[in-house]
Amino acid sequence: MSLGTGRSMVRVRWPGGGMLLPRRGVIVVSVLLLAILVLGLVALGLGDYPLSIPEVISSLFGDQGFATTVVVEWRAPRVVGAIVFGAALGASGALFQTLTRNPLGSPDIIGFSTGAYTGAIVSLTVLGGGFVSESIGAIAGGLITAFIVYLLAWRDGIQGFRLVIVGIAVTAMLTGVNSYLLVKAKTEVAMAAYLWGAGSLALVDWQQVLSALIPLAVLGVATVLVVRPLRQLELGDDSATAHGVAVERTRLVVVVVGVALIAVVTAVCGPIAFIALSAPQIAARLSRGAGIPVGASAATGSLLLLASDLVAQHVIPGSVPVGIVTVVVGGVYLIALLIREARRL
């Protein structure tokens, strides 16, 4: 791969193809990736057995005895999980906010995260749980919810604001369903589902991370492929159709890819709220380009989730699930976003 430069654009070339990217966007993503690397090394060194960054690097690339066990086997799965899952959440949020043309068009606002949680709860309470069944349940729940929301919001096509309103209503109903399922479940099952539902990376191990990496890699490729037609949709349906884009089919593919991204994450560590909501808007402000940058949103999501997990582990006394931290931070962000949108009216 090579880079060709221009005044405001950078051409990324690889064998058989290439694409133009905004120079500022490339710089923003590079800085975010560097920050993720540094913060990841810091996270690998923090804990009851503290290690310096040089010691962490030595443990990653050589056998340092107990230090290698601590870094590679105990801490690395959680750090890698935070980076990968944060990227999936950020990318999913970027897809939906671009599709709906609304900063509130996030999968955790319009019900898809809640639907994935419902599917996982059904798997846990009815089928007895297990990583595979919970994963299937979460993905099925998210896709079924997406289908219902899409169907209810359809009126000679999909309009972003209507999709958000319908999604909020479906979220409220699914929250009631989830509460009912937990009340009727056995106490130990309900407690496990409740704790898992807070959204936590504490129990993530290498097996779960590697199992999630395969579908997320496929979905990552699908995300890259849908970005170009999605950009055409931003110009309006008539313009997109004139450029040969199958409008409704593209919307449906974007919904499926976005829901699958959020569902895989939910299946592994529970519903982690507000990363998908806030990461795309932060990335858009950093990049200052047209539309919401999917790559920068994914990198921002990684950094946000990794930082939130560090706060959950090492700043708050007693250590709490990362989902609690993201809810607090995201709640403040959502209030600020609603105030800003109200002032525009």
Image (spheres, grey):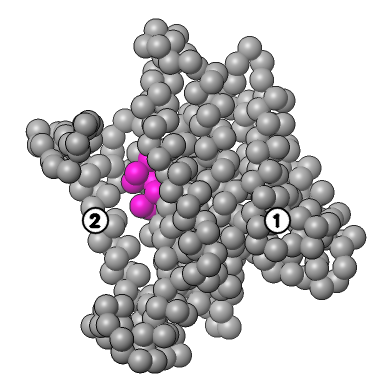
Which residue shows up at 36% across the image and 52% down it?
299
Task: For the N terminus, give its image quadrant.
Answer: top left
Residue designated by label 2: 31
Residue designated by label 1: 133
Residue 295 on the magenta span: yes
Going by the numbered disc 2, the residue's amino acid type is Val
Helix, strand or loop at mark 2: helix
Helix, strand or loop at mark 1: helix
The part of the chain drawn in magenta is 294-300
Which residue shows up at 82% across the image and 49% down it?
177
Please, what is the dominant secondary structure of the magenta stretch? helix
Tell me if residue 178 can be seen: yes
Q: Is residue 286 left or right of residue 256?
A: left
Q: Is residue 151 above or below residue 178?
A: above
The percent coordinates of residue 163 (x first, y second) are 62, 29
Viewer-side residue, 59 vs 269: 59
Using the rendered view, name the quadrant where residue 67 is placed: bottom left
Q: Is residue 259 left or right of residue 43?
A: right
Quote the CA–CA distance across marks 2 and 1. 38 Å
The percent coordinates of residue 280 (x first, y second) are 42, 44
The percent coordinates of residue 253 (x first, y second) are 53, 29
Which residue shows up at 30% across the image and 46% down it?
286
Going by the numbered disc 1, the residue's amino acid type is Ser
